[in-house]
Amino acid sequence: MDNIFLEQSDNSPKVIMDKDKAFIAFEGKSYPENTFAFYRPITEWLKQYFKYYNSSDKVTVINFKFLYFNSATTQIIFEILDIVEEFNSNNRVEINWFYNEENKNGFEDYEDYAEEFPKLNIKAVVW
Amino acid sequence: MNNNLTICIQVDDKSIYEFSGKINEQGMVNSANHIEKLLIENGAKTDKIQNVFELFIETMQNILSYAHNSVELQNKKREVLCNFSLSYFTENNTYVLESCNLIKNTQKELIEQKIQAIKDLDDKALRKLIRQKSRSKEDNHDKGAGLGYIIMTRKSSSPIETTFIPYEKGVLKYKQRLII
């Protein structure tokens, strides 16, 4: 399985999915026209990663640092967290939700994800 | 058709951005970036900018996906004839996003039902509904779980206003007004 590195565009985020460093990150705006098609390889990669590459001696870090995102991305974030919850058997994962302190929506989004996935212990990080 | 559609939205001196014509993904991105820049220059707060930006995107992606005259280009990208305007009202620091496009008349009832079902929900209930719909996979398809109107309702400061105007047989002009 190859790592995934995607450059940020005007409407899609920078994506880093590095199995060697156990590091996953999304950063920027996310509203591609075909959002589900954009994220399909990413969700498939995550399933494979947690099945075959996630070792107990490493903590996988996942950073969400979205500036703006559309409703389809909202749904994809739930799907990603569902995958982490279902496939991450050793529970060695650190999930960081970055938000702008001046933006109450960002923190409310964090609250919704944290409440929906209490076992994942998602952290809110001011940027 | 074009002449009727282009006068769909009244543009006045409150308008800070307006568009009329064919739009595709790149056009939407350009407009979104322009709107973001205008709001920053206007001194809008971060959460206001985010709400306007995201509701513009929801509106445009709804239009690209569901408009009667939406045309598929290469790679499942779409292009559609529509118009929209963004106005700013200093007295209450609100932005008004109006849009107009054509829909099949069979969509009218569906839109009205969706808006009716959520219009009296408070913020807490809307957030809960977003979570439920996102995880239940009910109502799920290539275009999403039908979260668009819920997010529009949540991020607007007043109920979504809609108008349906007969256009030609089986087709309506759909006007939508969001106050943010």
Image (cartoon, rainbow, N blue to C red):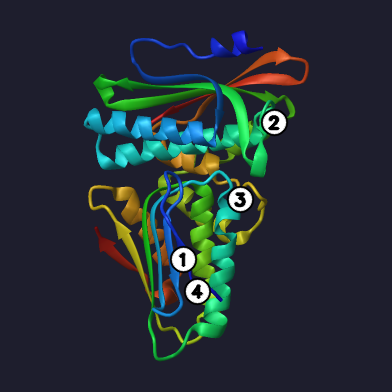
Q: What subunit carries mark 3?
A: B
Q: Which mark is residue A116?
A: 1
Q: What subunit carries mark 4?
A: A
Distance from disc 3 to disc 1, alpha carbons, whole Å, reads: 17 Å
Residues under numbered marks 4 and 1 in contact, where contact means CB atoms less than 8 Å apart: no
Q: Amino acid at mark 4?
A: Val
Distance from disc 4 to disc 2, alpha carbons, whole Å, reads: 37 Å
Q: Where residue A110 sits: x, y (%)? A: 36, 60
Question: Disc 3 vs disc 1: which is toward the camera?
Answer: 3
Question: Disc 4 vs disc 1: which is toward the camera?
Answer: 4
Label 1 crowd bin: few (<14), some (14–19), many (20+), radius 10 Å:
some
**Is the residue B163 above or below the residue A64 in the image?**
above
Q: Which residue is mark 2?
A: B107
**Marks 4 and 1 belong to one chain:** yes
- Residue drawn at (56%, 66%), measured in percent from left and top? A43
Query: Where, by quadrant of the figure, is residue B1 drawn?
Result: top right
Q: Which mark is residue B114?
A: none
Task: Point out the tag, 2 or 3, that comes first from the N-terminus.
Answer: 2
Question: Disc 4 vs disc 2: which is toward the camera?
Answer: 4
Q: Which residue is mark 4?
A: A84
Q: Along the horizontal axis of the image, is A40 left or right of A74? A: right
Q: What subunit carries mark 2?
A: B
Depth order, front residue of B4/A110: B4
Q: Where residue B97 sits: x, y (%)? A: 43, 26
Q: Amino acid at mark 2?
A: Gln
Q: Amino acid at mark 1?
A: Glu
Q: Which residue is mark 3?
A: B145
Q: Residue furthest right?
A: B169
